[in-house]
Amino acid sequence: MLPTRRTPMNRSRAVRSRASRLFACVAASMLSLLLVPMTAFASTQISVEGTSYDKAASGHGSGGGTWEWDGADAFGMTDYVGGRITANGALDITLTGENVIDYDASRDGGNTALVTGYDEGGTLTVEGDGSLTVNAAASEGDVLYGVYSYGDLAVENTSVEVNVASDGEETSAVGTASSGATRIDGSSVSVSAQGPGGSMGMTANEGFEANGSQVDVRVDATAGSPGFANGINTIGLSIANGSEVNVEVEAAGDAAGIFSFSSDRFVIADSTVRATAASSEGLGVGLRAENMEEGGTVNLIMRHANVQASGSTAAIWAYGQVPGSRITLERSAVVAPAGGAPQAIEVETDRFKMTYGQVIGTGAGTITSLDDPAVAKAVEVRAVDPTPTPTPVPPTPQPSPTPASSDGSGAILPATGDAAPSALALAGVLAAALAAGALLVAKTVARRRSGSLR
């Protein structure tokens, strides 16, 4: 058991209360999805700036630009500047130009700037060559949302910015939320959430995926009463295919840069992640993977990944209800701190009796307290490329050495030992001359015999 002195593991009742209220509000909204039909349908009703439509319509934003709805799931925005938009089913928003939704809960009512699927479920898709900025503000209430989908949320090949800020003493702020999964493909997404009652940048009930995307999340829950904050809050996580994700979180209560719970899936592959989490009164963990389902474990995988994580309590922590949770490095290596590696940890928390898992640590053996100095609070992991196997190059043939002649002239003599070609030629000339001389002598002798005897 941990000592009873005030430690990160024994945060105040106020912090627990704030966290419980926000989780309860989000959970209640997500559980309401169970009341909609299992088959999602296109929207049959939308509302733009407080005016409802139940058939195809179009119009102008109060601040400029236009919008157009086909009476089903297609909704176009062209340089739209205006207020709140809602739809009761699936909606596919196509962006042209620069579009802005400005929402003030105290002025416009409700608690969400852009919400879809509250009757029929379905996916909220945001795509197009343009961009969308959503600004939401409130001074009271329980939870303020920027974007909420009662089904999946898909951002595809576009640019989205969400800014949610509340100055209400107990109001929580959530940038984007989905009762289903959140998927970001080939896009740029920036989220800022600020609320003293606890805040989350992006939350997804059935998993968060980023593929080839840029995601920046900033969450602040330091003002007012102690509140908790999570940058990305999800059940299961995958960041892959060259994505770059930057998360910065500050809170008086518990803080997590990326927090995945109730799932065994937490993967960062071929991507870059920077996550920081600072807490003044609770736990601060950069990457936090939890699976406290019955018999649950989790594997936090960094596969050919570049990761910089830091937390006021721990940089990276994976744990479950039973032994077996782990941190796995595949084609990746811890480069800081020196000697850092996955290390076993078994600790009690205020939420669970006992947890088993691993942190990046610098010691040996099993850690039994998050206050142990062996728990690394700042970690850097770098992708490791395998050393390429060199391709064999065949040797270049070398010329055969030239043997020296017997007379030192360097002439190549035949292997039979005969004379060199020049010597043979000279011998031939001499032989011919001798033969000619012999013939001449023979003829002379013959003439003399025949002539001198007469």
Image (spheres, helix red, strand yellow):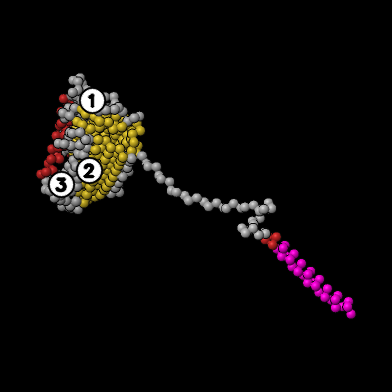
**Quarter where residue 230 is shown:** top left
List x then y, in percent, for residue 327.
Answer: 27, 35
Q: Is residue 384 magenta?
A: no
SS category of the residue bearing label 3: loop
Residue at x-position 25% and y-position 49%: 94
Task: Give the residues drawn in magenta, as a range.
Answer: 425-454
**Residue 369 marker:** 1
Residue closest to the far front: 453
How crowded pointer 1 is (Cα within 10 Å; few <14, some 14-19, many 20+) is rated as some
Q: Is residue 132 visible?
A: no
Q: Is residue 209 visible?
A: yes
List x then y, in percent, for residue 121.
Answer: 15, 46
Residue closest to the far top: 5
Left of 304 or right of it: where is 252?
left
* Mark 3 or mark 2, earlier in chain: 3
SS category of the residue bearing label 1: loop
**Residue 121 marker:** 3
List x then y, in percent, for residue 364.
Answer: 29, 27
Name the residue nearer the viewer: 333 or 253.
333
Q: Does the CB distance between marks 2 and 1 fall below 8 Å?
A: no
SS category of the residue bearing label 2: strand
Q: Amino acid at mark 3?
A: Gly
Residue identified by numbered label 2: 182
Q: Amino acid at mark 2?
A: Thr
Q: Amino acid at mark 1?
A: Ser
What's the CA distance linking mark 3 and mark 1?
44 Å
